[in-house]
Image (cartoon, rainbow, N blue to C red):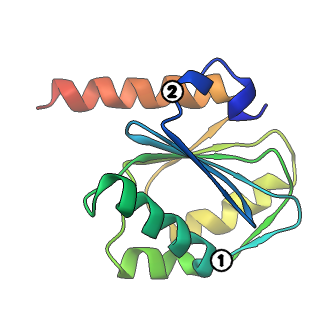
């Protein structure tokens, strides 16, 4: 299910349509929906980072949901660029309903050393983030 078709659509603060897919900015959450057949690499990620910083400032560290409604490819080693440039996300959730996505996750886990939450739906991904946000606020 696309974010715009979900009960979370009202939470969208900004949507940017790139040639590689749509990125949705919510308060403290970034959702990606990458287009079919795209090779998502550092060049794509950098565009999103620049726009995120323009919208929310240089300290923007959202929870990230990869809503994989289409089959696309990731350049896994480009995670190294992400971290070498000191960009971070609070959490990483992948909505994966296709079996081919499991192989992608194996490779992503090699480069993204923190936990990757695998969800079956947008609702499950959002509920996980809400739980994490509650824990964050309780620890302050």
Counting from the top left corner in percent of width and height, residue 64 is at 50, 48
Residue bearing mark 2: 11
Q: Closer to the N terminus: mark 2 or mark 1?
A: 2
Locate residue 121 relative to residue 92 in the image: left or right. Answer: right
Can residue 58 be seen in the rendering of this structure?
yes
Q: Quadrant of residue 136?
A: top left
Reply above or below: 112 against 89.
below
Give the quarter of the figure containing the C terminus: top left
Q: Position of residue 98 (x, y in %)?
A: 86, 44
* Few, some or many residues within 10 Å of mark 2 (<14, 14–19, 20+): some
Q: Which residue bears the numbered disc 1?
A: 41
In the rendered image, residue 83, in percent from the top left (x then y), is placed at: 39, 74
Identify the element where label 2 is drawn: helix
Residue at horizontal 81 percent and vertical 69 percent from the top: 38
The percent position of residue 34, horizontal first and vertical second, equals 74, 56
User: As drawn, which residue projects farthest toward the left?
Assistant: 140
Q: Nearer the viewer, residue 103 or 82?
A: 82
Which residue is found at the position 81% from the left and 44% from the top?
Answer: 69
In the image, 111: left or right of 94? left
Q: Is residue 120 visible?
A: no
Taking the spot 44% from the left edge, 69% from the top edge, the residue there is 50
């Amino acid at each position: 299910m696309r974010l715009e078709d979900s009960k979370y659509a009202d939470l969208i603060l900004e949507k940017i349509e790139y040639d590689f897919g749509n990125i949705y900015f919510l308060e403290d959450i970034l959702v990606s929906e990458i287009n079919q057949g795209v090779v998502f690499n550092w060049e794509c990620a950098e565009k999103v980072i620049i726009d995120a910083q323009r919208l929310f400032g240089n300290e923007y560290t959202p929870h990230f949901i990869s809503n994989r409604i289409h089959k696309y490819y990731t350049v896994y080693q480009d995670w190294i660029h992400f971290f070498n440039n000191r960009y971070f996300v609070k959490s990483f959730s992948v909505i994966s309903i296709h079996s081919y996505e499991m192989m992608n996750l194996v490779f992503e886990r090699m480069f993204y050393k923190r936990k990757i939450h695998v969800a079956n739906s947008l609702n499950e991904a959002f509920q996980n983030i809400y739980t994490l946000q509650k824990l964050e606020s309780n620890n302050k």
